Amino acid sequence: MHIVVCISHVPDTTTKIRFNKELTQLDSQGVKWVINPWDDLTLTRAIDMKEASGGKITKISVIHVGDATTEPTLRKALAMGADEAIRVDAVSSDSYSTASHLAAALKELEYDLVLCGIESSDYNSSAVGGMLAEILDLYSVSSVSAIELKDEGFVVKREQETGKETLRISTPFVAIGQKGIAIDPRIPSMRGVMSARTKPLKVVQGESGESYIHTMVYEYPEPKGSCRFFQPDETDQLADALRREAKVI
Amino acid sequence: MSIIVYIEHLEGKLKKQSRELVSYASQLAEKTSQKVTAVGVGDISREELESLSRFGASKIIHCSNPEAATLENQVYTQLLAEIFEKESGEILILANSFTGKAIAPRLSVRLKAGLVAGVVDLPESLDPFVVKKKIFNGKAFAHSQILTKSKILSLNSNACEVKEKPVESEWEEFSSQVSAPKAEIVDVSKMDADNLLTESSIVVSGGRGMKGADKWKPIEELASLLKGATACSKPVSDEGWRPHEEHVGQTGKTIAPDLYIAVGISGAVQHLAGVSSSKTIVAINSDKDAPIFEIADYGIVGDAHEVLPAFIQSVSKLD
Ligand SMILES: Cc1cc2nc3c(=O)[nH]c(=O)nc-3n(C[C@H](O)[C@H](O)[C@H](O)COP(=O)(O)OP(=O)(O)OC[C@H]3O[C@@H](n4cnc5c(N)ncnc54)[C@H](O)[C@@H]3O)c2cc1C
Ligand SMILES: Nc1ncnc2c1ncn2[C@@H]1O[C@H](COP(=O)(O)O)[C@@H](O)[C@H]1O
């Protein structure tokens, strides 16, 4: 079996976000780029499943739409344990164009499972996985908190506000992972880092895809009004403020 | 032309955000002279759905296809796409929830409709159509233009004020021939729909500063006194002090209650990502420099184990 993991490349969550003066572009100076935290977890799960599969899962590919500057991120994925990386060479401007590029590349592959994360921590769109599935007319399951290879297929736990469901799904399909799919991301070992240098990193040409969305301008959040402090023995006053001023209790 | 609003419910009760979604649509409809159609799927009563006419929904469509009993993304996509087209929909509005995240992207492709997810305000301009959304987990906003004729907006909680706007509503039962594939369900476990963290108006949350699983009594007591829910930071659920369903933040649940009380929580960016849309934030922390105070509206610098019992006393004295 072949698992394809879609990874996006995002600023580390602790990075301070800055834009250019015109507020039209992210200022990437000083930004530390990482694998999107969700994709770190889905990739970890894919590798765990491969190792436990007794040879049934033969290959894990990571795929990414981006320019050459993202290659260190792909090498990191290889060092974690992916067998091959594919970079679709394109700079996409919205989720739809990203999904179209991924779909075009996937059409050239044979695969059983495509894994995506529930959202990228840059644009928080939660869109690429579902769009990709719709373009390829594949079954999709989202909010996946566990996935397991059982017999010849996959058993998936889907967790939402209202409860959990365990589903058996026939391949191929798209699973969109969230909290729980793996606990901690794998840290590449020294050997992993060495072997990543010789693993294949293929570059396929992206076409200039259609976009549905255009970002006009960015905005920083307003600094929040300053906090009003009470002394530890002024809990009566705090309760009163919440009742009369904020009107929330 | 109409604005279609997809309404979610929990065991037949409208979700808290439903009124907000319909109110958003009617405020938008006033500018565009469109009509607002609310769509509910599954086991929900006519009375419950029709209550949305108080917020401006002039048509209510109920879809009772048995194939839609569980969230099959392709089934929902087909049903909603058919309704959207039948009603000459121009804008589709839904919640940026688990369900919204599951179906909005598929609908975007199916309807060739640009999707903006995580919308926080009414559109600032209609032509071009520009709307503001949250990005970088709340560290910035983007003003996004939708280039397509049909449009999909998934709304964050508190994206607009709820305004009453009673109208007469027309009722329609809808069903369709569904052909989409379905998964085999092996097991289902339902949560108590009455006490859901994401639906609560008040949330009392504890962090590592609470110092241990056995110290949670006052958090639970305060939450029950305020008829709210309990939550926690990630390390607390990692330690097993609290069940992981309570974990809020970037990798946990996103909540937007009217009141969020953070006790012994430092306020790391990843934590704030899940709670920053709360209307009012109260922080209790022994460190006056804790970053949580930067987003809190009210704060007490002090030991949680002394402040909380006193605060509980103060709240119970209110009538
Ligand atoms: C990729 C990634 C994702 C993450 N996702 C999340 C997430 O979703 N949610 C989340 O919460 N975290 C998340 N984290 C972890 C986050 O970075 C912080 O480590 C975490 O939020 C800290 O939890 P805390 O505030 O409970 O603990 P601490 O940071 O240890 O803070 C404890 C606080 O308690 C105070 N305190 C101590 N004693 C007392 C006392 N007696 N009375 C009152 N106050 C006291 C201290 O002053 C301190 O401010 C994530 C991290 C990463 C890297
Ligand atoms: N540029 C990209 N290349 C490959 N996969 C991506 C890319 N952007 C997003 N994804 C995938 O889609 C998921 C959701 O991202 P988004 O829709 O951008 O919030 C991510 O977790 C990835 O799995």
Image (cartoon, coloured by chain):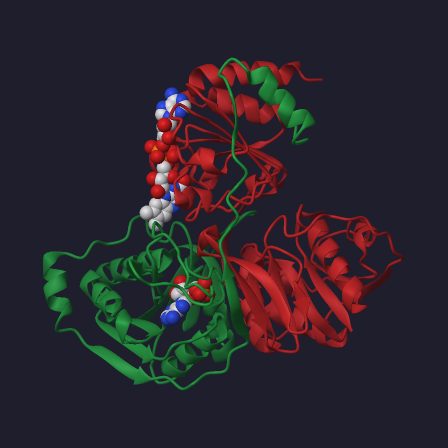
Residue A223 pos. (x, y %): 50, 44
The answer to whether residue A80 is seen in the rendering is yes
Q: Nearer the viewer, residue A224 or B123?
A: A224
Q: Colour of chain B?
A: red
Residue lying at 73% horizontally and 48% vertically, measured from the top left: B162
Q: Nearer the viewer, residue B172 or B15?
A: B15
State the residue lying farthest toward the right: B168
Residue A203 place in picture, x, y as percent: 27, 81
B315 displayed left or right of B35: left
Q: Quadrant of the N terminus of chain A?
A: bottom left
x, y percent for residue A185 = 28, 53
Is residue B176 among the parts visible in the rendering?
Answer: no
> Quick one: which chain is green?
A
Task: Identify whether B68 is placed above or below B278.
Answer: below
Which residue lies most toward the front here? A21
Nearest the viewer among B217 and A206 is A206
| Left/right of residue B76 with respect to residue A123 in the rendered view | right
**Where does the image place residue A10, in percent across and percent down from the top left?**
35, 61
Q: Quadrant of residue A228?
A: top right
Reply above or below: B81 against B311. Answer: below
Task: From the viewer's side, name the closer residue of A27 and A115.
Answer: A27
Q: Is B286 rendered above or below residue B116?
A: above
Give the image quadrant in which the ligand numbered 1 is located: top left
Quarter of the image with the C terminus of chain A in it: top right
Residue at 34% x, 66% y: name it. A7
Give the total number of marks visible in the rendering: 0
Q: Is residue B84 depicted above or below B293 in this figure? A: below
Q: Say which quarter of the image contains residue B196.
A: top right
